[in-house]
Amino acid sequence: MDDLHNNSIKNFLEEDFHIIHRKNTSTAKVNKHHHNAYEIIIQNNGTGNFFIKDKNYDMKAQTLFLINEYDIHHYFFPEKLKTYDRFVLYIKSEFLNNYFNYIDDDFKPIDIFKKEIKCVELNNPEYKQLKFLSEKMILELTKEKLGYKSIVNSYLLQFFVTIYRLLINTQNININNNEENESRLQKIIAYIDNNYKNNISLNEIAESLYISKYYLSHFFKDRTGFTIIEFLNNKRIIEAQKMLKNTNLNITDIAMNVGFNTLNHFERTFKTINGITPTQYRNINSNNF
Amino acid sequence: MTSNIDHSQYSQSDFSLLIEDFLISHRKKPVVLRGHKHYHNAYEILLTNSGSGEFFIKNRNYKIQDKTIFIIDESEIHRPKISEKNPSFDRFVIHIKENFLKNYFNNVEGNFNPLHIFNKNIKSVKLNNSQYNKLKYITEKLIFESTKKQPGYQSIIHAYLLEMFVIVFRLTEKNNFPEQKINSSNQKLHQIIEYINNNYKKELTLNDIAKSLYISKYYLSHFFKKKTGFTVIEFINSRRIIEAQKMLTGTNLNITDIAISVGFNSLNHFERTFKKINGITPSQYQEMETPGR
């Protein structure tokens, strides 16, 4: 998937759940990515911008970020950043959807991603609680004492319920900068979302929004950390991943469907982003066969 | 899942928990001073805040003091005896039904099963301050969540129970807590109970037991009552009813056959004894405890 997982503490429950305590930015620099896993971040320290899906959020201490399975996201930070400290949880959808089904409750852990709230500023007790649970999970997964899986389960469930409850009365916050910029960014992304299946160019996007090609490229790179073409390719690859996983279409058809002109270009782009070929991806993730 | 808070004094009406899956209570008043006898088919974990006396569990007595947990298996006969000088007994009690636990732990992978805490021979662990505070915190959270019922409460109750089970399990793994000494009178008690357990299916008299252990009938009754709070006959009946309860839910035998096979010589006597102990008749019990029958 990406090299971030090299320093992961421990695979757990067949790689469906990881928790990592990350303290340096060396991996974050190349951290332009999406995965088919949900991601929860507790930011302990550090500043910067966090682009998630179609908006920019202020990155600061004691902030919670919730990233959906296929949300494109990218963290970019000031050059001189000294402190950087966060807990990152990766959770596969299969795990999130099925693992806790035995509990008779209206609440399901997946619910915390359904409100589409991406960013929450935590008050002190909530932050301490989530930090405590993260540290406990890492400790238990490191020591592997008898019963560690059960107790990590318990902490994870406490973690989910804590987040769920704080989301009940929360709106998306920390949206960065002025509204005009954000609404322009969203228009660009909406245009890409609606047209990625066709052969679209920088020119077309710029024209449709009555801005110059030059301004568009700089603006978009500045706001998201992606070039337009990178973003477009990411979007196409995400849609391809869903099709590889959930349909029987052959790979050439999928490539065409998501807007690539040639199978070769599709396969190269796919491998650049995911580190594996579409066929390998299908073998690993397929729901059908 | 159902959960209940019971702040009331311990009483016979507690047997309502026969139809509950999970019950947690904070009890401050001592039992009736002479002691209360009961058992039920629910697992029980008891955490003491204060109190002194002795706790009879299964076949021996354990010391009651503050900051102690007691772990009681489904059908173990147990009874606390509170010191008359200091008749306060502040404790948290958690009852959990097997069904609740089954759904709950089926999901946990690997060879670890928190339920095994009940099969161990460790019934009592004296806690240090940090262990006590942690378990007390979880227990208070359990009570809070069962009372408030905020969104997600069922999930978080599961989480807290799971955490508690792992903590208790790890406590019983350690060997560094003082094992309670088996003195000679505990050993004698052990022998009597073993004799009853091996022979309750037949007609069993005080005389039989006394003879087989080379003690007088008089000594036997007084000794047994003093150590356990039960008369010998009460204890035999309790043992018989426990076995009958298992058969009522676990087999298709009819009630007369069950009565006979656990040592009663008339259906009438069985039904009266059953009702006295459980508050309901054997058929009612069977109906309540056998889902989908």
Image: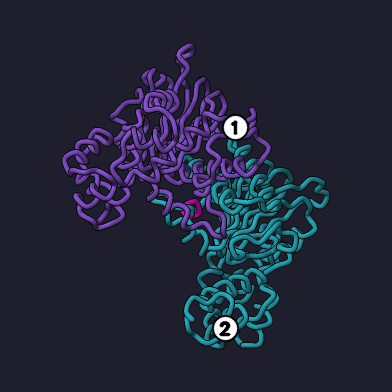
Chain colours: A cyan, B purple
Q: Is residue B268 above or below residue A25?
A: above
- Chain letter for mark 2: A
Left/right of residue A281 with respect to residue B47 in the rendered view: right
Residue A239 visible in rendering: yes
The residue at 55%/85% (across/down) is A256
Q: Which residue is mark 1?
A: B180
* Crowdedness near tag 2: few (<14), some (14–19) or many (≥20) residues, C-alpha within 10 Å: many
Residue B151 visible in rendering: no
Q: Is residue B254 above or below residue B12?
A: below
Is A114 covered by the magenta stretch? yes
User: Residue B291, percent across and down?
Assistant: 27, 53
Quarter of the image for the C terminus of chain B: give it.
Answer: bottom left
Is A13 covered by the magenta stretch? no
Image-quadrant location for residue A251: bottom right
Count of numbered marks = 2
Foreground residue among A130 and B108: B108
Foreground residue among B152 and B223: B223
In space, the residues marked 1 and 2 are separated at their CA atoms by: 72 Å
Q: Amino acid at mark 2?
A: Ala
Foreground residue among B78 and B13: B78
Secondary element type, mark 2: helix
User: Residue B30, percent across and down?
Assistant: 41, 20
Foreground residue among A191 and B138: B138
Q: Which residue is mark 2?
A: A255
Q: Amino acid at mark 1?
A: Gln
The residue at 50%/47% (across/down) is B119
Secondary element type, mark 1: loop
